[in-house]
Amino acid sequence: MLSTAALLADTPPQLLPARQLMAFTLASHILLVPFGVALPFITLLMHHRALRRNDAVALQLARRWSAVMAVQFAIGVVTGTVLSFELGLLWPGMLGRWGDVFGLGFGIEAWAFFLEAVLIAIYLYGWRRLKPWTHFWLAVPLPLAALMGAFGIIAANSWMNTPQGFRLDTQGNPVDVDVRQAVFTPIFGAEYWHFVVAMFLTAGYVVAGVYAVGWLRGRRDRYHRLGFTLPFTVAAILTPVQFMLGDSAARAVFHKQPIKFAAMEIVWETDTHVPEYLFGRLNGDGTISGGIKIPQLDSILAGFKPSTQVTGLTTVPAADRPTTVQATIVHWAFDIMATIGSLLILLALWYAWSWLRHRDLPRSRWFFRCAAVAGVACLVTVECGWITTEVGRQPWIVYNHMKVAEAVTDTRAGSLWAMLGIVIVVYVAVFGSFLAIILKMRTRWRIADEGLAASGAVPAETDTPYGPRSEPEPTSAARTPADGSDRTSGGAS
């Protein structure tokens, strides 16, 4: 405890508010990332099914998902832009010294962002103005642009975890930058694929969960069945794949970031035959309170045999490793992520067993209850994954090269706390608006489906996307032009 207090006393006062501000904005933004990365692909899967089978219900689902995708992207623009500014404002020491080495990743992400914005605009515009298959094929690059954006961000983050591709001069500044090595770091592959599959899995379970709730409320029509089945199937297929990728990523951390792995598993002393603790709390003297102890399992998971040596936290000085509180946080985040992943495998097996036996969805209401919760659980694992990645690297912002305290801004702590308060208020308004828009769209679609539009006009969603639009009945306030032209506003909102 005394060493922790001494470490905190040596940190600049602006470090805590800077961390809190970055943590809040990142935790908020990352909730939108699964939909930005994976929803375009899921939407295009449904769109392809609609065109190949001439399925009007699938086409309606694809069109509505594209509208949600556009709203989500707009909100992501706000939260992502704030993060970009914060990176430069809060951590000028890192960008000033290392920007030339790893900045390419952010450049790739920026280009992908603008490309994705253009492609989303084309996709929305094309619902009424392009031929069906032309419209579809023009949208095919959209998921690729989303993957390219993820590539850029993970390239930058993996470099922070395993920095390479440079040489330090006599003043300690990076020179002779090798861009290829700086992008493709030792941990990049494991981190990138683990992240991408997590985004697809999360988006699949969240979208399916919406229709699972409708199913539980008695909406057993084909619209809800198809809206549930396609995204859930994508997520169920990827669940065991993600479990293996997660195991591979953890083993990559064991080899490339041994101190982070020690924090993830709360290993105090370097040893073999190391037990695995499920949850539990690391104390200042190295003892562990609570949790479930499984003898030798940590060494087996790390190296496939009990004699595998696992590096402990005490291998490095206290100033160069996470504190006991940080290690406990990382350990809990990692265990929550692994526990939810294991439960999702059981849910996917339940779905697969029912489909193989009956060629139908499970009939149990408990299955749909679990499916409805799965999406929220996946969002929790996404947060836990980033906590593991970022907090486990402490106190380093660039692993073994620059500490967080060295990179932080010299802005007064009071100003940063005020900025955090403003950002919280803005984000509550932004996410509240996002939720209000989604609920408004849901209500409008439900009215359209039930034919209960109070005005008596035909809702736009009942029109055939690739057919002529319905013309409103002429009234005294709005007459149809004499030349018969259609001057109604277009769009696929």
Image: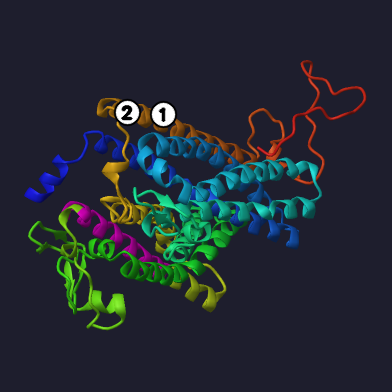
> Is residue 89 toward the left or the right of residue 124 in the image?
left
In the image, residue 460 lies at what x, y percent? 70, 37
- Numbered circle sitting on residue 426: 1
Of the residues shown, which amino acid type is indicated by label 2?
Gly
- Spot the residue most to the front: 170
Q: Main secondary structure of the magenta part?
A: helix
> Is residue 211 toward the left or the right of residue 282 in the image?
right
- Along the viewing direction, whichever of 171 and 401 lies nearer the viewer: 171
Is residue 172 in view from this perspective? yes
Region in magenta? 320-347
Q: How many marks?
A: 2
> Magenta stretch containing residue 337, yes or no?
yes
In the image, residue 257 lies at what x, y percent? 31, 64
For the point 10% across and 50% down, which residue is it?
3
The disc, 1 or 2, on the residue closer to the chain's N-terminal end is: 2
For the point 88% across and 29% down, which residue is it?
485
Is residue 217 in view from this perspective? no
